[in-house]
Image (spheres, rainbow, N blue to C red):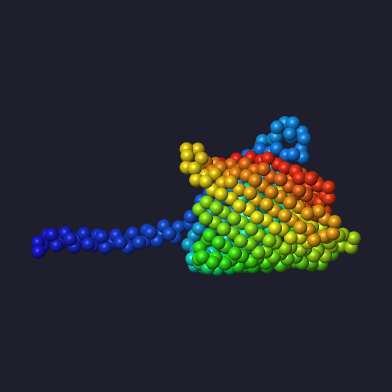
Amino acid sequence: MNKPLLKKHFLLFLVFGSLLPYHNFAQKKNEDEPKLTIGGALRFNYNLSSWKPEMQERGGDFGFDVFRLAVNGAYKNLYINAEYRLYSEAFGGGFLKQGWLGYKLDDKREIQMGLVQVPFGIERYNSHNWFLNLPYYVGLEDDYDMGIRYSYMGDMFEYHAGFFKNAEELTFGNNSPASPHRYSYDVVGNNKEVNQINGKILYKPRLDNMHKIGLSAAYGGLYNIETTQTGDHYALAVHYEYKSDDWFIKAQATKAAFNPENAAGNTRNIIQMGAYGTPYEVASNFEIYNFGISHLFYINRDFVEKIEIYNDFGYMHKRIDDFGDSYMNVLGVLINSGPVSTYIDYAAGYNHSWLGGDFDNEFSTGDPNAKWEARFNINIGYYF
């Protein structure tokens, strides 16, 4: 063999061999570097409500809904997820919607700590529309509390468990009432949610995510700042979720009861819950049945990519004599146009605090002579 050629090949081999460790080191270094992404949304809202005659005279109102920032970061198996929302002062102003530090034990197991989504019922949302569904308004849909959550996501089964020391604590006072300035509904006022445990199991019979059959349970304390006594509360749910490329179904039956240790003379048939800066009353014993269905159309045009048509129904049966039941139905469409998403909803409510009537007591005593009210709503958001 030609010696100069052999020498040349040998030198190339040395150079290539020396670059391999450098390439692996650089790749490993990139994998070890912290990653951070920032996103968010700016949303506006049009509202035309049947129970507001002056608004109807104006032809509805159009204004600011929310500006939000979302932060996601990762370093090796650690990651962070946080979302801060800024509403108008009338809707609570600014607050942290969610925020946790997570650790991936492996491909199927992880732990989250902080302001974590409570593992109960269908997640992330038990609905398809902008208004969500009845479980949200009593703290049982898209709820976030302060604690720790463990999740195992297998091929056939999923297990989720959590311990939550309390809901969002904003004042850290000795005997200060819980503030309603938050995203998800929690018990507020003289009672505070404490030391709650949650468990949820999901069964996927076809070893995929098309069908999910689940059971959820929650139990925790209710500390009363007047009596310094601790009552309790619990919730149970059975739920089913179906997902295909273009059809989606969500169904759930929920039982919940609250047993506060209130001061003498204060009823135990009603608890106070709050979010968006304003509290209202909720019956302390009820069941909720909700069902939602949607169909997705892939348009793939210049200005419209997808259109989703949906209907979400909810019924709240109150287990207290003379309390009027509550209903909710939302028929609507979601239009996706690149970074712009538009919800067009016709939301009808009966004894519903956010849909007509008396805001304070529609979810508690209600009105035996209530009538259906409706709100036509368009929410337009740019997501980045």
Q: In the picture shown, does residue 77 fall above or below 302?
A: below
User: Which residue in the rendered view is the most extreme toward the left?
Assistant: 2
Front in this rendered view, residue 258 or 196: 258
Q: Position of residue 137 (x, y in %)?
A: 71, 53
Front in this rendered view, residue 367 or 179: 367
- Residue at image x 76%, y 48%? 350
User: Which residue in the rendered view is the most extreme toward the top?
Assistant: 58
Residue 179, quarter of the rendered image: bottom right
Q: In the picture shown, does residue 57 fall above or below 229?
A: above
Specify whether residue 252 is in view. Answer: yes
Task: Report how many numbered discs are placed on residues in the image.
Answer: 0
- Residue at image x 67%, y 67%? 217
Residue 64, quarter of the rendered image: top right
Q: Quadrant of the N terminus?
A: bottom left
Left or right of 212: which side holds 367?
A: right
Q: Position of residue 347 (x, y in %)?
A: 69, 45
Left or right of 195: which side holds 106?
A: left
Left or right of 312: which side holds 54?
A: right
Q: Position of residue 167 (x, y in %)?
A: 70, 59
Front in this rendered view, residue 30 or 221: 221
- Residue at image x 58%, y 42%? 342
Q: Position of residue 359 (x, y in %)?
A: 78, 47
Specify whether residue 381 is in view. Answer: no
Left or right of 304: which side holds 25?
A: left
